[in-house]
Image (cartoon, rainbow, N blue to C red):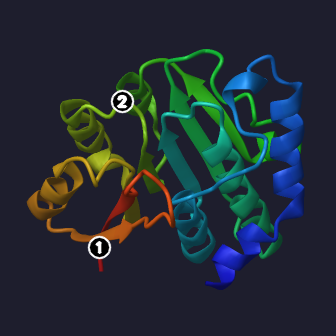
């Protein structure tokens, strides 16, 4: 809860998002107010785990990228440096990842699976948020399975929609939890985060 509060009170991050959205030619397609939703779970896990490497597939505007790099900034100040890598097939993705946030992360452009195949560093936190077809998601997990550090955590952003991360966890004897988002007074019933981890 303290990390959730820390994120909500991060005025520098909120102001950065508002500024970048306002200045973007895609401003009409983005909300100037940062609404983190279930990404709060990402932030808290990055602050708790203190990862060296975080990968997120599917960057879109870069809200998640900024949120994660904000967490990595704080970790670095506490003596736990880390770096963010996003992957996206859209060469214009990640336009929010600028200023000081860009010092803690970068976007690898191209097909996510091809980028993951070429990635050579041990992954501490992996976030699937790219192509939400079940088969593509499953292929991402298989691609990174031998690149995970011993205590790596995998977050599945589409685990409310399919069982691929659950099945991956069972296959490789990993534990699985589901973090449910429950919007108040909204037409959307909420989505969630699958969490795959070892002990």
Q: Measuring 43% from the left and 41% from the top, which residue is drawn there?
A: 129
Q: Measuring 75% from the left and 37% from the top, which residue is drawn there?
A: 97
Residue 98 position by quadrant: top right
* C-alpha span from label 1 to label 2: 25 Å
Residue behind mark 1: 198
Q: Residue 9, relative to residue 93: is it above or below?
A: below
Q: Residue 33, relative to residue 5: is it above or below?
A: above
Q: Are marks 1 and 2 in contact (CB under 8 Å)?
A: no
As rendered, which of 18 and 76 lies closer to the eye? 18
As rendered, which of 164 and 27 lies closer to the eye? 27
Q: Measuring 37% from the left and 67% from the top, which residue is drawn there?
A: 180
Q: Position of residue 195 (x, y in %)?
A: 34, 65
Q: Measuring 57% from the left and 27% from the top, which residue is drawn there?
A: 108
Q: Position of residue 16 (x, y in %)?
A: 86, 46
- Give the secondary structure at mark 2: loop
Q: Position of residue 194 (x, y in %)?
A: 32, 61
Whether residue 149 is visible, yes or no, is no
Q: Residues within 10 Å of mark 2 (few under 14, many from 20)?
A: some
- Give the secondary structure at mark 1: loop
Work out whether mark 1 precedes mark 2 in sequence or the reverse, and give the earlier one: 2
Q: Residue 135, relative to residue 24: is it above or below?
A: below
Quadrant for the C terminus, please. Answer: bottom left
Q: Residue 64, relative to residue 39: is it above or below?
A: above
Residue behind mark 2: 131
Residue 71 numbered tag: none
Residue extending farthest to the left is 171
């Amino acid at each position: 809860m303290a990390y959730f509060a820390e994120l909500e009170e991060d005025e520098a991050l909120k102001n950065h998002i508002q500024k970048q959205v306002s200045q973007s030619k895609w401003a009409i397609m983005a909300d100037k107010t940062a609404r983190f939703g279930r990404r709060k779970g990402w932030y808290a896990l990055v602050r708790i785990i203190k990862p060296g490497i975080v990968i997120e597939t599917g960057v879109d505007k870069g809200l998640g990228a900024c949120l994660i790099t904000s967490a990595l900034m704080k970790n670095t100040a506490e003596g736990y440096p880390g770096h963010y890598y996003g992957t996206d097939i859209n060469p214009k993705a990640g336009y929010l990842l600028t200023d000081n946030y860009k010092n803690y992360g970068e976007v690898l452009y191209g097909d996510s699976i091809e980028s993951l195949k070429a990635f050579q560093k041990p992954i501490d936190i992996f976030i699937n948020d790219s192509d939400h077809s079940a088969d593509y998601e499953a292929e991402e997990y298989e691609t990174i399975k031998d690149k995970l550090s011993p205590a790596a955590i995998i977050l599945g952003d589409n685990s409310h929609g399919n069982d691929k991360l659950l099945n991956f966890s069972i296959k490789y004897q990993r534990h699985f939890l589901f973090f449910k988002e429950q919007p108040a007074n909204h037409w959307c019933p909420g989505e969630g985060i699958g969490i795959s981890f070892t002990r």
